Image (cartoon, rainbow, N blue to C red):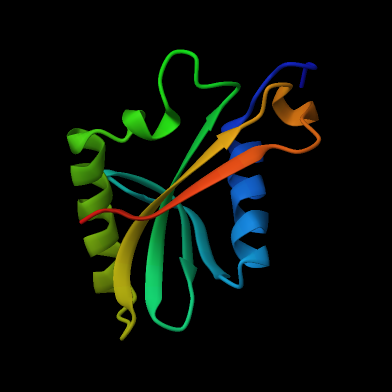
Amino acid sequence: MGKNNISGAWGEAQAALYLQKKHYRLVAAGYRSRFGEIDLIVSDRKYLVFVEVKLRKNSNFAKAFEYVDRRKQDRLRITASIYLAEHPTKLQPRFDVIEIYAPEGADTADPQFFHMEDAFQ
């Protein structure tokens, strides 16, 4: 990987570490259905959280969460429903978005995280 390359897998790994530091437990990563993919699934005592990770070098063009439009939300909802049918739980489902800004790509020493809890229903 070049100095300024930025990788979705790197971003998802960073987000997983960030969430674990906030006392979430990693349940699954990269869960796929024919309708879409959920980057991370984590839990705490109350919620099963479906996390969309958006990684950017900066927000000059648009904030990363703006890329989670209605169509993307619909695909995430359907995929989460399939996951819940396969893995029943008493935890409440929630959808979060984590924006990560990494100006030097994977070489960024201290990426910025913005965690939007309950980003959409």
* Quadrant of the drawing holding the N terminus: top right
Residue 6 placed where, x, y %? 65, 24
Residue 11 placed where, x, y %? 61, 39
- Residue shown at 74% from the left, 30% from the top: 106
* Quadrant of the drawing holding the C terminus: bottom left
- Residue shown at 33% from the left, 82% from the top: 89
Name the residue nearer the viewer: 11 or 103: 103
Residue 50 placed where, x, y %? 38, 58
**Numbered circles on residues, count:** 0
Whether residue 82 sits left or right of residue 21 in the image: it is left
Whether residue 20 sits left or right of residue 55 in the image: it is right
- Residue shown at 64% from the left, 38% from the top: 112
- Residue shown at 77% from the left, 30% from the top: 108
Instruction: Give the image quarter of residue 109.
Output: top right
Instruction: Give the image quarter of residue 117.
Output: bottom left
Vertical comparison of 61 with 56: above or below: above
Residue 99 placed where, x, y %? 50, 39
Whether residue 36 sits left or right of residue 99 in the image: it is left
Vertical comparison of 82 with 5: above or below: below
